[in-house]
Image: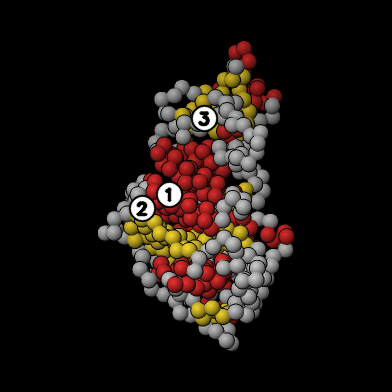
Amino acid sequence: LETLIAPSNTPGLPLWLVREADLPGLKARLGPAADAWLSQHGFAAERHRVLVLPGDGGAVAGVVVGVGALHDWSSFAWWHATGLPERLPPRDFRVEGDLPESALQQLAIGWWHGGYRLTRYKSSASSPTRARLVLPRGVDANAIARQGEASAWARDLINAPANELGPAELAASAGDLAREFAAEFRCIEGEDLLANNYPLIHAVGRASVRAPRLIDLRWGDPRHPQVTLVGKGVCFDSGGLDIKSSAGMALMKKDMGGAAIALGVARSLMARRAPVRLRLLIPAVENSVAGGAYRPGDVVRSRRGLTVEIGNTDAEGRLVLADALTEADGERPALLLDFSTLTGAARVALGPELPAVFSPQPELAEHIRRCGEQERDPVWPMPLWDAYDEELGSRVADLNNVAGSTFAGAIFGALFLRRFVTATPNWAHFDLYAWNARERPGRPVGAEAQCLRLADRLILERFGP
């Protein structure tokens, strides 16, 4: 924490966050010399515009940062601040002005988030000295560190190349987490998946030399309400025999993004000792092409007992999630959340920065949307449209893993999963991207822990601190 956030009693240079409408007032407050400096540099408080204020002898006297045409400080978002640790001089900065606590919280989150960099694969990588934010009033440093560390860990996992992070390594990461927080840990591997009735997980992962497995972590007082997290852990997805194009495979190291985010949520919950009985289930597989690969047209009996015809081997995520969700649903948890990079159709509908969320409970879906809005970790509710469900039918099995239609792919994926959640009312499915697709200040192209802060807040509001 201390590399990015300085204690609140640290002296720091003034940092002014200024909206376009407030610029005249700031100029009057700073005086004629600063007014002239801002005018000479054409500073108009544009979003992400940074200007250093000069002091005596070439020293830095402070910094002004534009936040654009922001109408209300309550809508200030963490991404306004992500670029600041590396764009400001390597000094300590203290926020000036009367900003509400919510904006200061978002500022601190963004500052931490913007400090993340993936450097471990570069032989010449160095750790630059970066600007630090003096902890603003009313901001909980422990909460910032807890969520920040969980997010950075999830991003590290997603960014890891598939040759470094396969099912075994993902399980090892979960095992390390369990030991850190004295949680129970179990992992069912390879042929034992069949012996323990997880046939869909086995079918998807059996062709790889890296054995499939089901990761199972439990933590907390059994007397507390149970919260179960399920994360899609496809460590690399070739598409199987319905093989992807080379372009389609380029980002498939991130197909375990749902698992990484579920792990991050679990870390954050355990770090704050949330009053829940936590269970984490991750089906970890590699979807490979080999002689033992499952085939289009195969029929596999699921853990629930439903038979599934394989219409497309590239729709593997819903298969491994089906067995894990069946296991989770058998305990009827108070809350069941699954996270997955499930469909490209969700990205077509909503883009890479807005995950889709599906739930049979409108109240839960709305609560999730509201938490996302408050945390600036947005999602958008989409319908489990019953009229489409029949299109998952099969002439030879109980259902197919894909629909015949090329439309509504995200809805079909969610409807397929719904077949395996029959006893738990409070279930939500997140179809997310887990990736920054374009370069922006403090948000490099690479992993993004979408829905992590949202889920942490949702569980806090439902079950207490």
Which residue is the extreme one toward the left?
223
From the viewer's perspective, is the residue at label 2 or at label 3 nearer?
2
Q: Residue 132 carries which label?
A: 3
Q: Is residue 217 left or right of residue 202?
A: left
Q: Which of 135 and 335 is in front in this view?
A: 335
Which callout, 2 or 3, points at the residue further toward the start of the chain?
Answer: 3
- Residue behind mark 1: 177
Q: Is residue 51 left or right of residue 153?
A: right
Q: Which mark is residue 404?
A: none
In which quarter of the view is residue 205 placed?
A: bottom right
Estimate the x, y position of residue 143 in percent, counting from the top left: 41, 42
- Residue behind mark 2: 183
Q: In this view, does 105 lie to the left or right of 118?
A: left
Estimate the x, y position of residue 389 in percent, counting from the top left: 54, 79
Residue at point 44%, 24% (across, down): 10
Q: Nearer the viewer, residue 317 or 423?
A: 317
Q: Is mark 1 on a helix, strand or loop?
A: helix
Q: Is residue 103 visible in the rendered structure shown here?
A: no
Which callout, 3 or 1, points at the residue further toward the start of the chain?
Answer: 3
Estimate the x, y position of residue 401 in percent, counting from the top left: 57, 75
Q: Nearer the viewer, residue 191 or 200?
A: 191
Which residue is the extreme one toward the top?
57
What's the distance in space between the residues labelled 2 and 1, CA to CA?
A: 8 Å
Q: In this picture, is 128 found above or below 78?
A: above
Tell me, yes or no, whether the two marked residues, 2 and 1, touch with CB atoms within 8 Å.
Answer: yes
Residue at point 41%, 36% (across, down): 141
Amino acid at pointer 3: Arg
